[in-house]
Image (cartoon, rainbow, N blue to C red):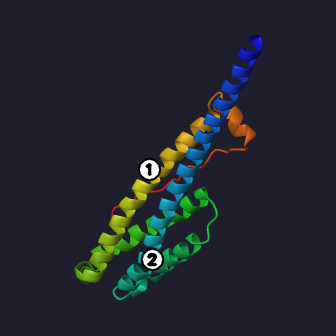
Amino acid sequence: MIEWIVVAGIIAVIVYGITIYNYLVRDRQRTRAGWSDIEVQLKRRHDLIPKLVDAVKQYAAYEQATLDQVTALRNQADDTLGVEQQGQLENGISRGLLSIFALQEAYPELKANQSFLQLQADISSVEADIQHARRYYNGAVRNLNTRIESFPDLFIARLFNYRPAQYFEFEEIQP
């Protein structure tokens, strides 16, 4: 009789360990999927930047330093390695885009340019999509990190070398 209780206890512990492991895998996959969604939106944003720079160049030739800075950051962002570094570069791009959008006040003909206005609307849409993807990703990171740090899940997480994921910090711009 005692043997059956011990066997049942061992089976319960194994089933519980498998369940925790599966939750960790699920949360890690959600985090990866969330980051993939962010990368897609950032790629869309990066694809719009050269078009925006070209549209502004026609009107604001002496603002070349701002345009070059945004272009350089965009090119650098394509080669980043981590979430934190990506966030820092994207925040630099956001500040540069705000500077570009501020140029329309100094150039009324730019404000009336349909191509510029369409690009501005497209970037605004992409910015909203980035924010949605960022919220999903950060929620997935929160769930994974909570599970990794919670008792008794932390034992399984440590056993399988799970590490906390980084949040994606990103400044929202309003063109």
Q: Nearer the viewer, residue 30 or 87?
A: 30
The one of 154 and 107 positioned closer to us in this rendering? 154
The residue at the point 67 percent across, 33 percent down is: 17
Q: Looking at the image, which is closer to me, 169 or 95?
A: 169
**Residue 120 higher or lower than 20, as above or below:** below
Tell me residue 175's x, y (percent): 33, 66
Q: What amino acid type is highlighted by mark number 2?
A: Asp
Q: Which residue is rendered at x = 35% and y = 84% of the image?
A: 55
Residue 47: numbered disc: 2
| Residue on which disc 1 sits | 135
The number of callouts visible is 2
Q: Point out residue 51 in the picture as x, y percentages from the top left corner.
A: 40, 82
Answer left or right for 5 relative to 144.
right
Using a 10 Å C-alpha cutoff, classify the residue at mark 2 as few (fewer than 14 neighbours), some (14 to 19) or many (20 or more). Answer: few
The residue type indicated by label 1 comes to Arg
Q: Earlier in the sequence, mark 1 or mark 2?
A: 2
Q: Which residue corresponds to the image point at 54% horizontal and 72% vertical from the top-left?
A: 73
Viewer-proximal residue among 81 and 40: 40
The answer to which image quadrant residue 121 occupies is bottom left
Instruction: Determine whether, in the image, residue 81 is placed left or right of residue 47.
Output: right
Q: Secondary structure at mark 1?
A: helix
User: Most extreme residue toward the left, as rendered?
Assistant: 112
